[in-house]
Image (tube, rainbow, N blue to C red):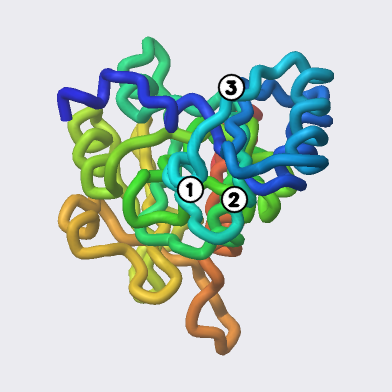
Amino acid sequence: MGDESVISPKDRFLTVYGRKPVLEALDDAALEVDKVILADTVRGPNAAEIQRAAKAAGVPVQRASAHRVKVLAGNGKQDQGVLADVVAPRMRSLHAALSDGRPPSRVLLLDGITTPANVGMILRTATAAGLEGVVVPRRGVAALDPMVVKASAGVAFRAPVLRCGSAREAAEMLTEAGYGIYALGASARSSVFDVELPQRAAFVLGGETNGVGAEVGELVTEWVSIPMPGEVESLNVSAAAAVLSFELVRRAATKASGTTR
Protein backbone atom coordinates (compact mmCIF):
# COMPACT_ATOMS: atom_id res chain seq x y z
CA MET A 1 0.00 0.00 0.00
CA GLY A 2 3.02 2.28 -0.15
CA ASP A 3 1.95 3.79 -3.47
CA GLU A 4 -1.27 5.10 -1.90
CA SER A 5 0.60 8.28 -0.99
CA VAL A 6 1.07 9.03 -4.69
CA ILE A 7 -1.75 11.20 -6.03
CA SER A 8 -3.27 9.63 -9.12
CA PRO A 9 -5.16 11.70 -11.70
CA LYS A 10 -8.09 9.39 -10.90
CA ASP A 11 -8.07 10.86 -7.39
CA ARG A 12 -8.42 14.42 -8.72
CA PHE A 13 -10.72 14.28 -11.72
CA LEU A 14 -13.97 12.78 -12.90
CA THR A 15 -13.62 11.91 -16.56
CA VAL A 16 -16.66 12.43 -18.73
CA TYR A 17 -16.76 11.23 -22.30
CA GLY A 18 -18.96 11.69 -25.32
CA ARG A 19 -19.79 14.89 -27.22
CA LYS A 20 -22.86 15.96 -25.21
CA PRO A 21 -21.47 15.33 -21.67
CA VAL A 22 -18.23 17.13 -22.57
CA LEU A 23 -20.09 20.13 -24.01
CA GLU A 24 -22.33 20.25 -20.92
CA ALA A 25 -19.28 20.23 -18.65
CA LEU A 26 -17.63 23.02 -20.64
CA ASP A 27 -20.81 25.10 -20.56
CA ASP A 28 -21.27 24.74 -16.78
CA ALA A 29 -19.67 27.77 -15.10
CA ALA A 30 -19.74 25.95 -11.74
CA LEU A 31 -17.37 23.27 -12.99
CA GLU A 32 -13.62 23.50 -13.50
CA VAL A 33 -12.52 21.44 -16.50
CA ASP A 34 -8.82 20.63 -16.45
CA LYS A 35 -8.50 19.57 -20.08
CA VAL A 36 -10.27 18.10 -23.07
CA ILE A 37 -8.75 15.25 -25.06
CA LEU A 38 -9.93 14.89 -28.63
CA ALA A 39 -9.18 11.90 -30.84
CA ASP A 40 -7.26 12.74 -33.99
CA THR A 41 -10.01 10.95 -35.94
CA VAL A 42 -12.58 13.58 -34.90
CA ARG A 43 -12.69 16.25 -37.60
CA GLY A 44 -15.04 18.75 -39.16
CA PRO A 45 -18.02 20.38 -37.39
CA ASN A 46 -17.90 18.04 -34.37
CA ALA A 47 -14.27 18.87 -33.63
CA ALA A 48 -14.88 22.57 -34.25
CA GLU A 49 -17.81 22.63 -31.83
CA ILE A 50 -15.75 21.05 -29.05
CA GLN A 51 -12.80 23.35 -29.71
CA ARG A 52 -14.99 26.48 -29.68
CA ALA A 53 -16.58 25.50 -26.37
CA ALA A 54 -13.21 24.68 -24.83
CA LYS A 55 -11.73 27.98 -25.98
CA ALA A 56 -14.69 29.90 -24.54
CA ALA A 57 -14.16 28.13 -21.21
CA GLY A 58 -10.39 28.65 -21.29
CA VAL A 59 -9.73 24.91 -21.32
CA PRO A 60 -6.82 23.38 -23.25
CA VAL A 61 -7.55 20.75 -25.90
CA GLN A 62 -5.11 17.91 -26.45
CA ARG A 63 -5.11 15.61 -29.46
CA ALA A 64 -4.55 11.87 -29.03
CA SER A 65 -5.10 8.68 -30.95
CA ALA A 66 -8.59 7.20 -30.95
CA HIS A 67 -7.18 4.19 -29.09
CA ARG A 68 -5.70 6.42 -26.39
CA VAL A 69 -9.04 8.18 -25.87
CA LYS A 70 -10.81 4.81 -25.52
CA VAL A 71 -8.25 3.68 -22.94
CA LEU A 72 -8.57 6.91 -20.95
CA ALA A 73 -12.37 6.85 -21.11
CA GLY A 74 -12.50 3.19 -20.15
CA ASN A 75 -15.38 2.77 -22.55
CA GLY A 76 -15.02 1.31 -26.02
CA LYS A 77 -18.36 2.31 -27.49
CA GLN A 78 -19.61 5.63 -26.21
CA ASP A 79 -16.65 7.98 -25.94
CA GLN A 80 -17.25 9.42 -29.46
CA GLY A 81 -13.57 10.36 -29.57
CA VAL A 82 -13.72 13.03 -26.88
CA LEU A 83 -13.35 13.23 -23.12
CA ALA A 84 -12.90 15.88 -20.47
CA ASP A 85 -11.23 15.74 -17.07
CA VAL A 86 -13.43 17.65 -14.62
CA VAL A 87 -11.89 18.75 -11.32
CA ALA A 88 -13.65 17.10 -8.37
CA PRO A 89 -12.65 19.41 -5.51
CA ARG A 90 -13.67 17.05 -2.69
CA MET A 91 -12.27 13.87 -4.22
CA ARG A 92 -9.03 12.53 -2.79
CA SER A 93 -7.37 9.26 -1.89
CA LEU A 94 -8.47 7.38 1.21
CA HIS A 95 -4.84 7.51 2.32
CA ALA A 96 -4.92 11.31 2.23
CA ALA A 97 -8.21 11.45 4.16
CA LEU A 98 -6.91 9.15 6.90
CA SER A 99 -3.64 11.09 7.12
CA ASP A 100 -5.53 14.33 7.64
CA GLY A 101 -5.46 15.99 11.05
CA ARG A 102 -9.25 15.65 11.13
CA PRO A 103 -10.15 12.40 9.34
CA PRO A 104 -13.84 11.82 8.59
CA SER A 105 -15.76 10.33 11.51
CA ARG A 106 -18.38 8.55 9.39
CA VAL A 107 -17.80 7.06 5.93
CA LEU A 108 -19.56 4.72 3.56
CA LEU A 109 -17.59 1.97 1.83
CA LEU A 110 -18.91 0.60 -1.45
CA ASP A 111 -18.16 -3.09 -2.03
CA GLY A 112 -19.07 -4.67 -5.35
CA ILE A 113 -21.77 -2.17 -6.35
CA THR A 114 -21.63 -2.38 -10.12
CA THR A 115 -24.77 -0.52 -11.24
CA PRO A 116 -23.86 3.10 -12.11
CA ALA A 117 -27.33 4.34 -11.12
CA ASN A 118 -26.87 2.99 -7.59
CA VAL A 119 -23.40 4.51 -7.21
CA GLY A 120 -24.69 7.86 -8.47
CA MET A 121 -27.69 7.88 -6.14
CA ILE A 122 -25.54 6.88 -3.16
CA LEU A 123 -23.16 9.77 -3.88
CA ARG A 124 -26.10 12.19 -4.09
CA THR A 125 -27.67 10.93 -0.87
CA ALA A 126 -24.42 10.88 1.11
CA THR A 127 -23.56 14.40 -0.03
CA ALA A 128 -27.05 15.63 0.90
CA ALA A 129 -26.66 14.05 4.34
CA GLY A 130 -23.36 15.82 4.88
CA LEU A 131 -21.27 12.66 5.17
CA GLU A 132 -17.56 13.34 5.02
CA GLY A 133 -16.56 10.43 2.83
CA VAL A 134 -17.77 7.76 0.43
CA VAL A 135 -15.06 5.23 -0.36
CA VAL A 136 -15.34 4.24 -4.03
CA PRO A 137 -12.68 1.63 -4.86
CA ARG A 138 -11.20 1.64 -8.34
CA ARG A 139 -11.78 -2.10 -8.67
CA GLY A 140 -15.04 -3.96 -8.14
CA VAL A 141 -17.30 -0.90 -8.24
CA ALA A 142 -18.88 0.90 -11.20
CA ALA A 143 -16.51 3.43 -12.74
CA LEU A 144 -17.22 7.09 -12.01
CA ASP A 145 -18.42 7.84 -15.52
CA PRO A 146 -21.19 9.95 -17.13
CA MET A 147 -23.85 7.40 -16.11
CA VAL A 148 -22.88 7.81 -12.45
CA VAL A 149 -22.79 11.60 -12.85
CA LYS A 150 -26.25 11.56 -14.46
CA ALA A 151 -27.72 9.36 -11.72
CA SER A 152 -26.34 11.74 -9.10
CA ALA A 153 -27.90 14.72 -10.94
CA GLY A 154 -24.42 16.23 -11.18
CA VAL A 155 -23.68 15.96 -7.45
CA ALA A 156 -20.93 13.39 -8.14
CA PHE A 157 -18.64 16.24 -9.21
CA ARG A 158 -18.66 17.66 -5.67
CA ALA A 159 -19.23 14.51 -3.62
CA PRO A 160 -16.70 13.61 -0.89
CA VAL A 161 -15.30 10.66 -2.84
CA LEU A 162 -12.37 8.75 -1.34
CA ARG A 163 -10.40 6.50 -3.69
CA CYS A 164 -8.41 3.33 -3.09
CA GLY A 165 -7.62 0.12 -4.93
CA SER A 166 -10.19 -2.29 -3.53
CA ALA A 167 -12.83 -2.59 -0.83
CA ARG A 168 -10.63 -5.04 1.09
CA GLU A 169 -7.73 -2.61 0.99
CA ALA A 170 -10.05 0.16 2.24
CA ALA A 171 -11.35 -1.99 5.09
CA GLU A 172 -7.78 -2.78 6.14
CA MET A 173 -6.77 0.88 6.07
CA LEU A 174 -9.86 1.93 8.01
CA THR A 175 -9.34 -0.77 10.61
CA GLU A 176 -5.72 0.27 11.08
CA ALA A 177 -6.89 3.86 11.51
CA GLY A 178 -9.19 2.86 14.37
CA TYR A 179 -12.54 2.69 12.59
CA GLY A 180 -15.22 0.21 13.51
CA ILE A 181 -16.43 -1.58 10.37
CA TYR A 182 -20.21 -2.04 10.19
CA ALA A 183 -21.79 -3.98 7.35
CA LEU A 184 -25.42 -3.91 6.31
CA GLY A 185 -26.96 -7.37 6.18
CA ALA A 186 -30.65 -8.29 6.09
CA SER A 187 -30.30 -11.07 8.68
CA ALA A 188 -28.25 -9.12 11.24
CA ARG A 189 -29.75 -8.94 14.72
CA SER A 190 -28.44 -5.46 15.54
CA SER A 191 -30.49 -2.58 14.18
CA VAL A 192 -28.87 0.35 12.42
CA PHE A 193 -31.09 2.53 14.63
CA ASP A 194 -29.80 1.11 17.93
CA VAL A 195 -26.21 0.01 17.43
CA GLU A 196 -23.65 1.80 19.59
CA LEU A 197 -21.04 3.45 17.40
CA PRO A 198 -17.44 4.39 18.19
CA GLN A 199 -15.98 7.80 17.40
CA ARG A 200 -15.00 6.61 13.92
CA ALA A 201 -17.16 4.22 11.92
CA ALA A 202 -17.28 2.93 8.36
CA PHE A 203 -20.43 1.38 6.90
CA VAL A 204 -20.07 -1.22 4.15
CA LEU A 205 -22.70 -1.34 1.43
CA GLY A 206 -22.55 -4.58 -0.52
CA GLY A 207 -23.21 -5.41 -4.14
CA GLU A 208 -26.65 -5.69 -5.69
CA THR A 209 -26.55 -9.49 -6.02
CA ASN A 210 -24.07 -10.90 -3.53
CA GLY A 211 -24.00 -8.27 -0.79
CA VAL A 212 -20.82 -7.66 1.18
CA GLY A 213 -17.98 -9.80 -0.12
CA ALA A 214 -16.16 -12.39 1.99
CA GLU A 215 -12.86 -10.49 1.88
CA VAL A 216 -14.41 -7.44 3.50
CA GLY A 217 -16.72 -9.55 5.68
CA GLU A 218 -13.68 -10.95 7.52
CA LEU A 219 -12.92 -7.46 8.86
CA VAL A 220 -16.45 -6.47 9.90
CA THR A 221 -16.80 -5.36 13.53
CA GLU A 222 -20.56 -5.86 13.58
CA TRP A 223 -23.35 -6.61 11.13
CA VAL A 224 -26.40 -4.38 11.26
CA SER A 225 -29.78 -4.45 9.57
CA ILE A 226 -32.57 -2.05 8.71
CA PRO A 227 -35.75 -3.24 10.47
CA MET A 228 -38.48 -3.97 7.94
CA PRO A 229 -41.84 -4.88 9.53
CA GLY A 230 -43.37 -5.31 6.09
CA GLU A 231 -43.07 -8.42 3.96
CA VAL A 232 -40.08 -7.33 1.89
CA GLU A 233 -36.80 -9.22 1.98
CA SER A 234 -34.43 -6.35 1.27
CA LEU A 235 -34.04 -2.79 0.02
CA ASN A 236 -32.21 -1.58 -3.05
CA VAL A 237 -28.68 -0.67 -1.96
CA SER A 238 -29.16 3.02 -2.72
CA ALA A 239 -32.35 3.06 -0.63
CA ALA A 240 -30.49 1.35 2.21
CA ALA A 241 -27.74 3.95 1.91
CA ALA A 242 -30.35 6.70 2.24
CA VAL A 243 -31.82 5.18 5.41
CA LEU A 244 -28.35 4.80 6.91
CA SER A 245 -27.15 8.27 5.90
CA PHE A 246 -30.11 10.05 7.43
CA GLU A 247 -29.98 7.92 10.57
CA LEU A 248 -26.48 9.34 10.99
CA VAL A 249 -27.92 12.83 10.43
CA ARG A 250 -30.51 12.14 13.13
CA ARG A 251 -27.86 10.94 15.57
CA ALA A 252 -25.70 13.99 14.96
CA ALA A 253 -28.68 16.32 15.49
CA THR A 254 -29.66 14.49 18.67
CA LYS A 255 -26.11 14.71 19.99
CA ALA A 256 -25.94 18.43 19.16
CA SER A 257 -29.19 19.10 21.01
CA GLY A 258 -27.98 17.22 24.05
CA THR A 259 -30.91 14.79 24.14
CA THR A 260 -30.70 11.02 24.30
CA ARG A 261 -31.51 8.68 21.44
Residue 200 picture quarter: top left
Please state which amino acid type lies under the numbered disc 1.
Lys
149 vs 177: above or below? below
Residue 111 picture quarter: bottom left
145 vs 76: above or below? above
Mark 1: which secondary structure? helix
Is the Cβ of the residue at disc 2 closer than 8 Å to that at disc 1?
yes
> Label 1: which residue?
70
Of the numbered discs in the image, which one, if any, rests on residue 151? Answer: none
How far apart in space, not on screen, are marks 3 and 2 (Cα)?
24 Å
Mark 3: which secondary structure? loop
Count the marks: how many? 3
Q: First in sequence, mark 2 or 1: give its number.
A: 1
> Label 3: which residue?
89
> Label 2: which residue?
79
Which x, y percent locates residue 87? 60, 24
Q: First in sequence, mark 3 or 1: give its number.
A: 1
Q: Residues within 10 Å of mark 1 (few under 14, many from 20)?
A: many
Which x, y percent locates residue 123? 58, 46
Please state which amino acid type lies under the numbered disc 2.
Asp
Please state which amino acid type lies under the numbered disc 3.
Pro
Which x, y percent locates residue 190? 37, 63
